[in-house]
Image (spheres, rainbow, N blue to C red):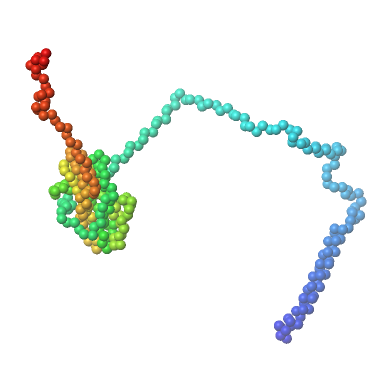
């Protein structure tokens, strides 16, 4: 006989049998619960059994629960904290006084070491495509501070591969001194941009040098000679796998006048040097002679 046909034939009958069995089971469970909870079976206990509750008996009557008293009958509590006296610290006569910290001295700015090599000798060798300039040009005492940027605006220039040198030249001569600079990102406050060169944050620099004491790696040359100085920048870089050097002259408006190791003026484009103070006019010999009274003239007046 086909199994599926047998299931369809006996499926209804099986459900009816299951429901009848479940109903009988519920009736039996209900009857057992009713018999256990609704009838008293104390007559089945042995004679003499005590059916009292398991609570300790006492001959004393239970104490009455005190009647709650109104809170208004009690005085109001004083919640003000009582001050506690603190003993004054005892001074140790042998105690060592705490030293007053001494302020750290202001660090002296690092000064660049001068270079006198002929490879930095200026001349008519300014290269094209240079983008150079200064954002800071000032001095304190005899120390000059320069900050700026320098790069070649050509395809493939990498600021990370460049080294920048400042050239200080005595105007009208070939006397010069060169100072290496320090790369400082974003020191100009306005990072240069280019569609050709890249990593131009590495093309920003700063340098400090002392005009009163030109020191090379081997000797002390003393102060810069008297005169007016102009400035240039030298860029050494690797371009297309070769070492390349480019020299650029800054605007001649950037100039410095030095005398006896002191800076008389430090000018930027568009500024002029302050006028030198005029010497006080000296008295002429004739005026000096007339101002003096001879002894004979004094005697005549008397």
Residue positioned most to the bottom:
1
Image x and y of residue 92, in percent: 47, 25
Count of all numbered marks drawn on residues in the image: 0
Occupied quadrant, residue 196: bottom left
Image x and y of residue 62, in percent: 84, 39
Image x and y of residue 267, in percent: 23, 45
Image x and y of residue 203, in percent: 28, 54
The answer to whether residue 54 is left or right of residue 111 is: right
Residue drawn at x 85%, y 61% is: 34
The correct choice, above or below, for 165 with respect to 57 in the image is below
State which quarter of the image contains the N terminus. bottom right
Residue drawn at x 9%, y 15% is: 300
Residue positioned most to the top:
302
Residue positioned most to the left:
296
Closer to the camera, 91 or 29?
91
Query: Is there any visible trace of residue 219 in the rendered image?
Result: no
The answer to whether residue 221 is left or right of residue 97 is: left
The correct choice, above or below, for 110 with respect to 291 in the image is below
Occupied quadrant, residue 235: bottom left
Query: Is there any visible trace of residue 292 in the rendered image?
Result: yes
Residue positioned most to the front:
301
Residue drawn at x 83%, y 46% is: 54
Closer to the camera, 263 or 154?
263
Closer to the camera, 158 or 302?
302
Residue drawn at x 85%, y 64% is: 31
State which quarter of the image contains the C terminus. top left
The answer to whether residue 275 is left or right of residue 92 is: left
């Amino acid at each position: 006989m086909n199994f599926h046909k047998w299931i369809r034939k006996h499926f209804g009958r099986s459900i009816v049998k299951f429901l009848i069995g479940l109903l009988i089971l519920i009736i039996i469970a209900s009857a057992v619960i009713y018999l256990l909870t609704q009838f008293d079976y104390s007559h089945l206990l042995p004679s003499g059994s005590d059916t009292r509750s398991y609570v300790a008996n006492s001959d004393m009557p239970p104490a009455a629960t005190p009647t709650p008293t109104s809170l208004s009958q009690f005085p109001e509590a004083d919640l003000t904290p009582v001050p506690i006296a603190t003993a004054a610290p005892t001074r140790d006569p042998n105690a060592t006084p705490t030293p007053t910290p001494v302020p750290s001295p202001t660090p002296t700015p690092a000064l660049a070491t001068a270079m006198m090599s002929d490879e930095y000798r200026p001349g008519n060798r300014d290269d094209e495509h240079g983008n150079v300039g200064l954002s800071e040009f000032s001095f304190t005492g005899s120390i000059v501070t320069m900050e700026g940027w320098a790069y070649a605006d050509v395809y493939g220039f990498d600021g990370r591969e460049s080294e920048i040198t400042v050239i200080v030249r005595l105007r009208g001569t070939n006397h010069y001194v060169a100072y290496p600079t320090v790369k400082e990102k974003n020191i100009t406050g306005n990072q240069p941009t280019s569609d050709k060169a890249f990593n131009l944050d590495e093309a920003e620099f700063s340098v400090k040098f002392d005009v009163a004491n030109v020191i090379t790696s081997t000797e002390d040359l003393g102060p810069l000679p008297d005169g007016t100085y102009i400035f240039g920048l030298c860029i050494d870089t690797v371009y297309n796998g070769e070492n390349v050097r480019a020299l650029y002259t800054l605007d001649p408006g950037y100039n410095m006048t030095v005398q006896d190791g002191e800076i008389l003026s430090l000018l930027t484009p568009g500024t002029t040097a302050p006028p030198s103070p005029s010497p006080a006019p000296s008295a002429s010999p004739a005026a000096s002679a007339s101002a003096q009274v001879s002894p004979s003239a004094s005697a005549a007046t008397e």
